Image (cartoon, rainbow, N blue to C red):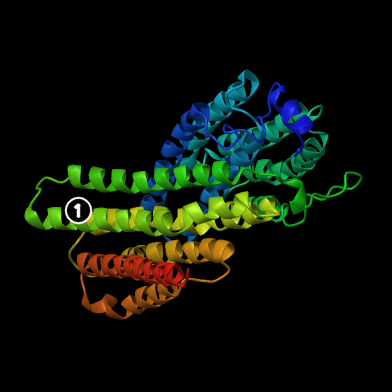
Amino acid sequence: MTALNDERFAESACLRARGTAREGKVAFAELFFDLVFVLTIIQLSHSLAAHYSPTGLVEAAVLMLAVWWLWIYTTWATNWLDPDKAPVRILLFVLMFLGLMLSIAIPTAFGEGGLLFALTFVAMQVGRSAFTAYVMRRDWPENSLNFTRITAWTVFSALFWLAGAFVEHEARLVLWLVALAIDYLSPALGFSVPGLGRSTVSDWEVSGEHMAERCALFVIICLGETILVTGRTVAGMELLDGFTIILLAVAFLSTATMWWIYFRFGHGEAAHLIEHSATPGRIARMAFTYAHIPIVAGIVLSAVAEEFALAHPHGAVDFKTASAIIGGPVVFLAGNIWFKAAIRGRSPLSHLVGIAALLCLSIIVPIVEPYQLFMAAAVVLFGVALWEFLSLKSTRADDLAQV
């Protein structure tokens, strides 16, 4: 980017200054905005635990995908908009209030809360995209055109979100699935709009540092929700004995291991790669917009698993408990495989073996109790983290020896 462009962005009423130390800095207004999503993730987790069934899983997946799309689109926008400037800060506060309303609607989104959920979702998606297109029109017309295309697609999907709110049960689920398909396919189609052309990945100049830190903070929110679920479940017990404390320690270890796998071996590499890539938009879209979906979903499902295991540690292992205990880490590791393959060009063997080992645990489901299955899954997850740590440590030692 030229010096003229740097000056143009620095003088903009809404855009971030480019080519400065503040370009990738996460603003306090963004952190404040994230507070709403603490409640959102809690609502998703509670709703899934309360309605855990094949249908409940699909409904929870629809809501989680919608919430993620709201959050990641806002992250892309604030990669270019400066939250320290008044108009952008006001936008975030408005989105925050709408996000609060959205969170309130989540438990009843497939019931009487459907219209509130759809209205707030559509208002956030269309409003943010239209605002971004408008404020970029003078200082960055190329990206303004991109967001004009995005706005057109969000209006298109809004038709199905709103239509779904006026029907019930299976019909709502089908219409909302169509709306999600439109939302998620539009980037792959370059947000193509007749008369406006289509976007290409070379159009998206992003700050890798900002994108990586924002996504890392969302992962922290999800991991924090897992700890909150664990603490709330144990705090509600009448007796806190040694066995419960051991289970609490295992639950905490499992959460800490997920932190270790994500932050120790992927987050920093992704930021570095985007910053030095000729097409940073392509890497950011794959590694952050899409690959983080199963990472977040796996953490939420693991939180549900911890609640099941802590609340009912003894007795036979039913389907919902087994699928949550095994499925949570499996989905989380699958997301990390996708994420790390996008930035390294190869899938970590430790994660592939870990998924296989977790799936093999299904064999022992009929002969163990919930707490035993939960402990076994935690051991596998820790083994994956340790394997990757030792493998990368050995690789780096070999690289230094060759210097």
Please provide percent x and percent y for residue 35.
44, 33
Closer to us: 70 or 209: 209
Q: From the viewer's perspective, is 335 left or right of 284?
A: left
Residue 52 visible: no
Q: Residue furthest front?
A: 403
- Quarter that holds the N terminus: top right
Q: Residue furthest top?
A: 86
Please provide percent x and percent y for residue 280.
67, 51
Image quarter for residue 72? top right
Q: Residue at x 13, y 53 (%)?
A: 245
Closer to us: 37 or 273: 273
Residue type at numbered disc 1: Leu
Crowding at dot 1, Cα within 10 Å, few <14 / some 14-19 / many 20+, comes out as many
Please provide percent x and percent y for residue 5.
77, 32
Tag count in the figure?
A: 1
Residue 270 visible: yes
Residue 13 lies, with reference to residue 369, above or below; the image says: above
Residue of label 1 = 248
Q: Residue at x 40, y 73 (%)?
A: 350
Q: Secondary structure at mark 1?
A: helix
Image quarter for residue 355? bottom left
Please provide percent x and percent y for residue 316.
22, 70
Residue 219 lies, with reference to residue 24, above or below; the image says: below
Q: From the viewer's perspective, is 168 left or right of 357?
A: right
Q: Residue at x 67, y 34 (%)?
A: 18
Residue 209 lies, with reference to residue 389, above or below; the image says: above
